Amino acid sequence: MVFSSTIFLWVFLPICLIGYYLLDRKFKNTFLLIMSLVFYAWGEPRFVILLMLSIIINYLLALFIDKKRDNKICLRMSMIAMVVWNFGLFFIFKYLVFTMKNINLLFRADLSIPDIALPIGISFFTFQAVSYVMDVYRKKCEVQKNLFDLALYIAFFPQLVAGPIVRYNSIVAQLKNRKETLDLFYQGIKRFIVGFAKKLILANFFAIITDRIFNVPGDELTFAMAWLGGIGYSLQLYYDFSGYSDMAIGLGRMFGFEFEENFDYPYIARSIREYWRRWHISLGAWFREYVFYPITTSRWLAKFNKKIKNKFGFKVSRKVGVMLPLFITWMATGIWHGATWNYVIWGFYFSFLIIMENLGFDKKLESIPKVFQHIYVTIIMLIARIIVRTSSVSEFVQYMKAMLGFGNGFTDAHTNFLWSTYIVIIIIGIIFCIPVAKWLREKMESKKITKNILFVLEPIGYFGLFILSLSFMVNSSYNPFIYFNF
Amino acid sequence: MSIKIERIRNIISTIIFLVIVIGGFIMHYDEFKLDFEESYLDASFGNISEINSSMDRKIKESLQIELKRELSNIMGIFYKATNVDVIGNFEYYTNGDYILYFGKTLSTKTYPDVFRELQELKKISEIYDIELLYIQAPQTFYEHIHNVDPYVASVLNIEPRASELADGIEKIGIPYVDMGQNLDSIEELNVTDTPYYYRYKTDGHPTTSTSWWAVKYLVEYMGIDAQEMLDWNSYEIVKNAFLGGNARNVGEYFVELDEFIRLYPKFDTAFTKTYYNSTNSYTGTFDEIVMSGYPKDGDCYNYFVTDYLHYGADCVCYDNLLNEDGTNVLFICDSFGFQTGAYLSLFVDKLTFVDPRFDGKIHNLPLSEYDYIFVMSRSGLYADYVLGVCDKEGCEITGVEKNEELLEVYVKNTGEVVWNSENLVRLCLYIDGADTGCRWGIDGDINVKPGEEYVFEVDISEFELSQEQSYSFGMLQEGWLYFDNIFEVNDILFEETEIIY
């Protein structure tokens, strides 16, 4: 089910809200769990069983880990089982077809390719389940004895299919003890409306531009059109995904939950590292906590580093100690996004950039004027977008040629038509992806008179935006979120 | 601001939100219940996403018309404010005082094909002494009249296409009239000042006035003396506000409303309507028979511009019972000629109306009976449907074989354009000659080039097959045309056992 659809807004959400607030406290979580399974089943009925199986197995594994904490072999075996189950599932549904196709290609084999559909949200709910078991293993939280509460953590509908990836230790307290307040509900409404508008008004507009331009044959792309496509896709991805996260956070608040932020104006970043601290924050945090840190503190890396140190000296070993975990983490991040070579290249691309910044390039970057730092990040991200948006290497090369001015000239009638049609929307998109509204709000809140004006205008503005978004929803066709594919 | 006031504001805001959300649920409870009971509970798991989108569509359709209108207007204001002309799959180009629509310019046919087919049609018409007239309907716009964006002009490329068609037809020797050349003669409309007005601002179709102007032309062309009937004083004129299909999503503030005129004869009329391939016939007045294509939806916002004849019906014959000595006309057109055809039926004895986009069998019509064949098209935008008149195929179904539970349908591309999933060339199942709506597309990235064969693997197990019905396959280009090659498969389906599924 898609948040920005009539079924969600006018059927699912009202049933959820009415049921939730009418029920006694002890039934609330169970009710939310049932509704979450209905939410998932609405689009993917076959995979509800998979989701439930995943919940039960991780629940049992965590109980076993907690019970056999003193038995190291049991602990190790259960962690292996956890990895095999979760990532095995992940591999089968997400990467098996890709792997087999490439085996066929590389070894001229004739493996028959199974027809495997990707369960929506598998990348998200698997990571949440792993987070829980890992946190129990590391004693960061107590084991959850109530299966329904754990199931709600993994399957709670706002974050089930496209995040944010909520880490267990950040939400465990809220599962049992949360307080629904009017203020929190109002905050939730505001946040939901912002996300709703981001998706329906802006993201869908940018989708039209992007689809159109990326469908133009490579040799017909002009310089100005290629740039418009790159900018359009960057904005589409931002508004689509951050819009979903806003709606998820808003819905969470309506039910008394406080999720962590997932976006913090990524396009104002002045380095790639900063960018990733602002974009899909929950994914970055997950990889940092469950991939990067375990690798950096692992024995095998220490041993490996020792060998390097003995052979090449301390400086080199220190660099390798940073580079290797970063490389593994960013390759994993790339592959997490999708089973295509584009994402493998994407992983290499960001591994290289992040390693470079860690090895001192960030210092050099800081020494140049801020405007150039922004240009650097913008160009790097535009290229990254094109890597994943184009369908082949030759298409990517042709697109980049056009962006560099070696395409079908500077502009043509089609390009002029697109630019003149979308220029206002592009400007709106750019303005709202930098913290202009936040800055304006802070300014207004600093003076009493403007603060009072803001107080009155705020709900009017939000509901105006909501009505405008509704007008888009009613007139639009089915339009799923991009991150449903991940 | 005190906490108390802030609390009051939050309460009011929360109530408004809940009213919108829960109010929406209450308003659409019936649709939800209906769909859930009728579809969801009976559906196999694989159908859930279809039900999902069907429910979404039903909820949208069920919105109160006034609410939808206001929401559309709000969206329209946003479009207007941001100067955006492109909406979803359809594209709009606005230049201050008019709005255009253009769709895909897909066609599996090329002009040389058209000319070959028209040559054959001309030969047939000469054999049977039929007067053939090719009518080029007014284009959506003319470069010499409108200030058109160069890109839009290049996409539509209308005038060069129209000229190419005109030149070709002239060479063949078929009488040809370009109605667009005579726009100045629409006296009722000051076309110079309001160049868009020969068609609706909110829809690509010609207005009633324009259609009437075409009727006048054709009546005079046939030499029928009917001055009294051509006078609008002989009709009751009903005017309604109208928002055409191309603009309904953006509301009236964006494009303004059109005026939709209906003419109801004050004089006596009596018609019999017969659908092609059917023995059923209906008798009644002009209002009842010809102008009852769609139910009315109040006085305002009737979405159907083609409220004449029966849009989507393949072939219908209107027999004017009060004009038994009149002429017999075969009128071949797309939606552009609907109103023209409807009013023209008042002046003739019989008018057989054919929309070739919906019928691949019209070559079976008894051509010897017609006095006139009028072919009316608008070549700039549409696929060259006129090919449906003749027997030249774009495809050939070369065979159908049973393969366990599946049927393998072998199809050869005998046209000149590549088929693929993108240009919507699909296989269609007919039951008793009627399109079931059941389609099979060409897989993924496969391109079926001219001369190449493609095999559709077809599972029709969901149909309860009966030997009393006739099953056949045909090809079509979705939304544009049916290929004229239907392959009956009853022999294959019921070959050995009574029912194979």
Image (tube, coloured by chain):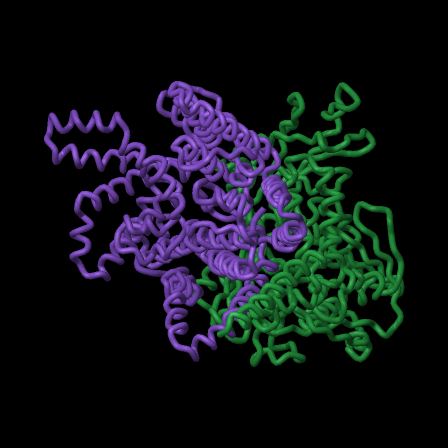
A268 sits to left or right of A136: left
Q: Name the image quarter holding the C terminus of chain B.
A: top right
Quarter of the image holding residue B211? bottom right
- The chain that appears green in the image is B
Q: Residue furthest front?
A: A70
Q: Position of residue B377 (x, y in %)?
A: 63, 59
Q: Position of residue A452 (x, y in %)?
A: 47, 76
Residue A389 against residue B328 in the figure, above or below = above
Q: Nearer the viewer, residue A400 or B385?
A: A400
The answer to which of B337 and A281 lies nearer the viewer is A281
> Eyeballing the image, is A213 above or below A122?
below
Relative to A70, does residue B460 appear above or below in the rendering? below
Towards the viewer: B333 or A120: A120
Residue drawn at point x = 65 percent, y = 27 percent: B407
x and y, in percent, of residue B226 in the image: 80, 73
Q: Quadrant of residue A231?
A: bottom left
Residue B447 in view: no
Residue B143: x and y in percent read: 49, 69
Residue drawn at 56 percent across, 54 percent down: A180
Q: Label the purple chain with its letter.
A: A
Q: Is residue A428 left or right of residue B42?
A: left
Q: Total number of numbered labels?
A: 0
A181 vs B288, left or right, is left
Q: Quadrant of residue A26?
A: top right
> From this viewpoint, is residue A289 visible?
yes
Q: Which residue shows up at 80% across the image and 30% down it?
A: B466
In the image, is residue B239 above or below residue A383?
below
Q: Give the residue at x 65% y 66%.
A: B244
Pick whichever, A232 or A9, lies toward us.
A9
Task: Please give left or right for residue A104 compared with residue B382 in the image.
Answer: left
